[in-house]
Image: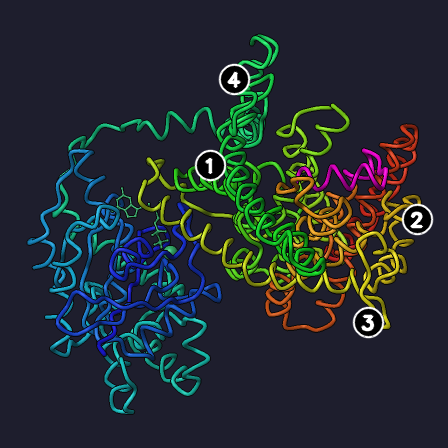
């Protein structure tokens, strides 16, 4: 099969083109560095299928970070049949810098001028025929986003792949020209592949190249002595870069006709950035936007109209739709969707319970309480997860999240945190696993380690049911607050914990200054509807698949171990205390006493300990376990309709008499403790050093205990806030003293 590789600068649209060519749904983010590993797909519209490889973004072929090495080595060593060099045509000259390097490799190359829609919108024109003539490689205008010109691109790439191509360099008019051609001839004589490319890199004394051709370095030095006089300076890398840019401006730039040639234009993006990345208002605006999102997703008092509406305005009392659109207030879109799903799951479980009413007790127990009670308790949250994700993806795709990284970099750099590290953290809101993999873009090992450790604190989709179910139950039983406020607050608790933890690590065990953060802010653009829908569909599919595999299996196991004792006798629902699960739960229950959901809960209090434990497999399990146990506790599901996670938690709260602070501590515990198996495995594979991984587990356990017990203590005895503050102050002093000592050492 032919193999075409996509290479280009970060954020030039490689993944968008890859998705358009292969019909896959790889993550497209509007910031540099989303793709950190190469991905393969198949283009099927040609006579024969063609493999497409999406490479991580690179600015040059002299790599600094691991993912840049992946891209370079692929192009050099794997000999693709054609390299499709995709460039952001709105930044033509800068993007052509990489092109001048790829051109030096002996491989067929096709240039894809992407984002032509944006170029045309600006009124600029690019003469692709002229560019093609000057570059000596085929040039095709495309818009990956609108899938325009991509089939033409593939045709040209196919044509190009049919003939071998010799590399060509634009380094002319300088003394380097002779040096390069001499090295090239020598390398060629030694049978080195891609002699021109390596000759240029050797002349630059590129780090990787020097390692690879140690024997050639002496030769290069000798050549340099004979060809180049001292007045020339010895920063050859800069010389080569300069030669490339000069050539680009002289020969390639004329192909671009700008509409506003000499005027400095303030784009709408620039105007928006004046406000959104404002020094002082930037962060408050972000917090406000985040709150608006939570309000739209979780509020049962939308726009706070509750008090102004006539009582039970659309409660639809007596109908099946009772409460769907709101009771007292208006339900936000997220809540309305949730209620509709609950209506559906409720109807299904009623039906099934009806059919099973004559079957043996354990059959209806297992199916109604165990399976349905567990799965339906989390399935109801799917709409809210999707709504939340939709908003997050809009923020991301529009280019706003990249700004957040920029703002936070400005604010927190002196504490050892760089904006680059925030991008994987923000990805953690989706799922920790890809977020942890994305930390490969961080060149600094210590910064990477600190980032991997705190990623789970950025609450992922699977933790959402915990937040929503418990907040819902809190609002229902204690009559305090709104679900949106509580979930928003808990997300902030996670973010703040993460930031404090990173700062402490960066000032102590993982100390160091972050590398400079240079990122071009992508232009704002409207998110693409199709991309968005694909992403949501993917997410929904994944969630449902998980519900009917891992979660289903776990709920069945939970039901069995809660209905049999160690001697394998079947126990009815009201004797769960004596079951295997009950035994284990009561054994570990005391360790949660400082957190409020330990020994102080007598009647059935162990269910919280057990739920937290099952959360280690997958975080959805926390609520599904509570759902299963609640369904058992209130008897067969026929009597009480326990379909939603909120109802299940409310029931458990009534039985165990757990208090409000303990419930908040329980949420915080699940957010900050050891994440699910998948995330633990991802963290482990990102930490080749075993002892680092061991300490990471210790870090998660201790963070969760510290944060949750602080919440419980302060919530129960308000004056303990002073003790907590004092402790925090002492810790801060220690961290500072340590940091000073390290820096003094460094200066010596
Ligand atoms: P990658 O980093 O090279 O993989 O780039 P992505 O495929 O992730 O795209 C980066 C951003 O550019 C995303 O926000 C895309 O929606 C946007 N983008 C990609 N192709 C086009 C295009 O043809 N036109 C416009 N206007 N935007 C595009
Ligand atoms: Mg990409």
Left or right of residue 37: residue 323 = right
Q: Give the label on residue 599, or none.
A: 2
| Image position, residue 439 (x, y; %) | 55, 58
Disc nearer the start of the sequence (1/3): 1
Left or right of residue 554: residue 655 = right
Res. 499 image quadrant: top right
**Ligand 1 within 8 angstroms of badge 1 C-beta:** no
The local crowd at label 3, few if under 14, some if 14 to 19, many if 20 or more residues have their Cα within 10 Å, is few
Disc nearer the start of the sequence (3/2): 3
Question: Could you tell me which residue is drawn at 75 percent across and 53 percent down?
Answer: 612
Residue labelled with disc 1: 391
Residue labelled with disc 3: 568
The quadrant of the picture occupied by the C terminus is bottom right
Question: What is the distance, in whole Å, between disc 2 and disc 1 at their CAs?
Answer: 40 Å
Q: Are marks 4 and 3 in contact (CB under 8 Å)?
A: no
Q: Are marks 2 and 1 in contact (CB under 8 Å)?
A: no
Residue labelled with disc 4: 314
């Amino acid at each position: 099969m032919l193999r075409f590789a996509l290479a280009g600068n970060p954020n030039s649209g490689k993944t968008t083109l890859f998705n358009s060519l292969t019909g896959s749904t790889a993550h497209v983010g509007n910031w540099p560095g989303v793709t950190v590993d190469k991905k393969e797909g198949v283009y099927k519209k040609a006579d024969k299928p063609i493999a497409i490889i999406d490479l991580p973004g690179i600015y040059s072929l002299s790599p600094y970070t691991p993912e840049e090495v992946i891209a370079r080595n692929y192009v050099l060593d794997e000999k693709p049949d054609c390299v499709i060099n995709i460039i952001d045509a709105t930044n033509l000259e800068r993007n052509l810098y990489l092109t001048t390097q790829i051109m030096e490799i002996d491989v067929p190359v096709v240039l894809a001028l992407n984002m032509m829609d944006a170029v045309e919108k600006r009124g600029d024109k690019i003469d692709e025929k002229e560019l093609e003539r000057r570059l000596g490689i085929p040039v095709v205008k495309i818009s990956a986003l609108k899938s325009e010109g991509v089939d033409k691109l593939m045709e040209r790439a196919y044509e190009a792949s049919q003939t071998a191509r010799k590399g060509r360099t634009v380094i002319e008019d300088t003394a380097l020209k002779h040096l390069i051609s001499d090295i090239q001839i020598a390398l060629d004589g030694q049978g080195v592949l891609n002699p021109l490319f390596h000759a240029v890199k050797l002349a630059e004394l590129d780090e990787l190249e020097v390692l690879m051709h140690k024997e050639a370095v002496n030769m290069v030095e000798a050549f340099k002595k004979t060809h180049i006089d001292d007045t020339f300076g010895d920063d050859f890398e800069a010389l080569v870069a300069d030669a490339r840019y000069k050539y680009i401006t002289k020969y390639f730039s004329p192909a671009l006709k700008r509409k506003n040639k000499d005027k400095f234009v303030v784009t709408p993006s620039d105007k928006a950035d004046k406000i959104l990345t404002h020094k002082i208002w930037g962060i408050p605006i972000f917090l406000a936007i985040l709150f608006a999102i939570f309000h739209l997703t979780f509020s049962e008092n939308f726009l706070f109209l509750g008090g102004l509406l006539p009582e039970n305005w659309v409660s639809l009392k007596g109908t099946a739709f009772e409460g769907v659109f709101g009771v007292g207030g208006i339900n936000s879109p997220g809540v309305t969707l949730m209620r509709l799903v609950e209506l559906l799951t409720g109807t299904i479980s009623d039906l099934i319970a009806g059919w099973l009413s004559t079957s043996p007790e354990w059959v209806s127990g297992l199916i109604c309480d165990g399976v349905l009670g567990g799965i339906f308790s989390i399935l109801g949250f799917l709409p809210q997860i999707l709504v939340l994700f939709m908003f997050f993806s809009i923020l991301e795709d529009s280019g706003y999240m990249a700004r957040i990284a920029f703002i936070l970099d400005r604010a927190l750099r002196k504490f050892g945190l760089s904006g680059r590290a925030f991008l994987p953290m923000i990805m953690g809101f989706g799922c920790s696993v890809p977020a942890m993999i994305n930390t490969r873009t961080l060149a600094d090992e210590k910064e990477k380690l600190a980032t991997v450790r705190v990623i789970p604190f950025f609450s992922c989709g699977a933790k959402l049911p915990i937040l929503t179910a418990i907040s819902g139950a809190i609002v229902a039983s204690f009559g305090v607050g709104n679900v949106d406020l509580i979930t928003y607050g808990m997300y902030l608790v996670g973010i703040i914990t993460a930031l404090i933890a990173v700062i402490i690590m960066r000032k102590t065990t993982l100390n160091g200054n972050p590398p400079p953060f240079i990122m071009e802010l992508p232009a704002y653009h409207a998110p693409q509807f199709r991309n968005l829908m694909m992403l949501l569909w993917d997410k929904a599919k994944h969630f449902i698949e998980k519900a009917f595999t891992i979660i289903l299996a776990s709920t069945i196991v939970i039901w069995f171990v809660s209905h049999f004792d160690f001697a394998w006798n079947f126990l009815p629902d009201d004797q769960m205390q004596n079951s295997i699960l009950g035994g284990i739960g009561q054994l570990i229950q005391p360790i949660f006493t400082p957190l409020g959901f330990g020994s102080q809960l007598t009647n059935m209090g162990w269910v919280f300990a057990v739920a937290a434990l099952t959360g280690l497999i997958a975080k959805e399990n926390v609520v599904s376990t509570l759902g299963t146990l609640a369904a058992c506790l209130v008897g067969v599901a026929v009597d009480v309709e326990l379909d939603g996670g909120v109802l299940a938690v409310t029931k458990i709260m009534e039985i165990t008499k757990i208090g409000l602070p303990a419930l908040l501590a329980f949420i915080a515990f699940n957010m900050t403790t050891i994440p699910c198996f998948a995330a633990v495995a991802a963290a482990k594979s990102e930490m080749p050093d075993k002892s680092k991984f061991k300490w990471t587990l210790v870090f998660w356990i201790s963070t969760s205990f510290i944060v949750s017990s602080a919440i419980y203590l302060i919530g129960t005895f308000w004056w303990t806030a002073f003790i907590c503050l004092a402790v925090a102050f002492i810790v801060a002093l220690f961290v500072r003293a340590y940091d000073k000592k390290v820096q003094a050492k460094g200066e010596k």
